[in-house]
Image (cartoon, rainbow, N blue to C red):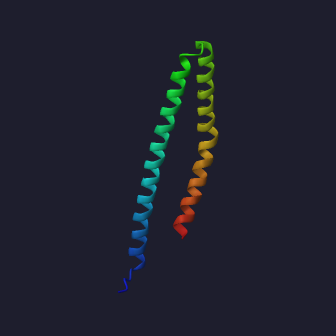
Amino acid sequence: MVIVFSQNQLYQRMGHFFILNYYFTFVIWDNLQYDLCMIIVGITVSLSGFLSPFVMAWILTVFGLLGTFIFYFITPKLDILKDKAIKEEMRI
């Protein structure tokens, strides 16, 4: 049995696959972010019992600056790479 699709039907099926693939990637990344945040929170709460408030302030400042660095410098580059990957995937 051979199934023949027109070009429009094939593009529609590829589009649905792409949307599902993108959705599942988002869900996995979201769960990974949540787990990583919970690990960082657990470590900082545990350390706050042993370290002075001054040291904890420095640690939290470093985390804040690191987050700012990632947001302003790394995220735009990742968006450019993601757009290139999407364009490459749509050409296939």
Which quadrant would residue 75 be assigned to in this image?
top right
Measured as percent of width and height from the top left, residue 73 is found at: 64, 40
Drawn side of residue 74 relative to residue 2, left or right: right
* 15 w.r.t. 66: above or below: below
* Along the line of sight, the residue nearer the viewer: 79 or 59: 59
* Along the line of sight, the residue nearer the viewer: 8 or 57: 57
Drawn side of residue 2 relative to residue 39, left or right: left
Which residue is depicted at the point 49% across and 40% down? 33
Which residue is depicted at the point 35% across and 86% down? 1
Which residue is depicted at the point 47% across and 38% down? 35
Measured as percent of width and height from the top left, residue 5 is found at: 38, 80
Measured as percent of width and height from the top left, residue 32 is found at: 49, 43
* 86 w.r.t. 34: above or below: below
Drawn side of residue 23 relative to residue 52, left or right: left
* Along the line of sight, the residue nearer the viewer: 58 or 44: 44
Which quadrant would residue 53 be assigned to in this image?
top right
* 88 w.r.t. 50: above or below: below
Which residue is depicted at the point 43% across and 78% down? 7
Measured as percent of width and height from the top left, residue 30 is found at: 45, 44
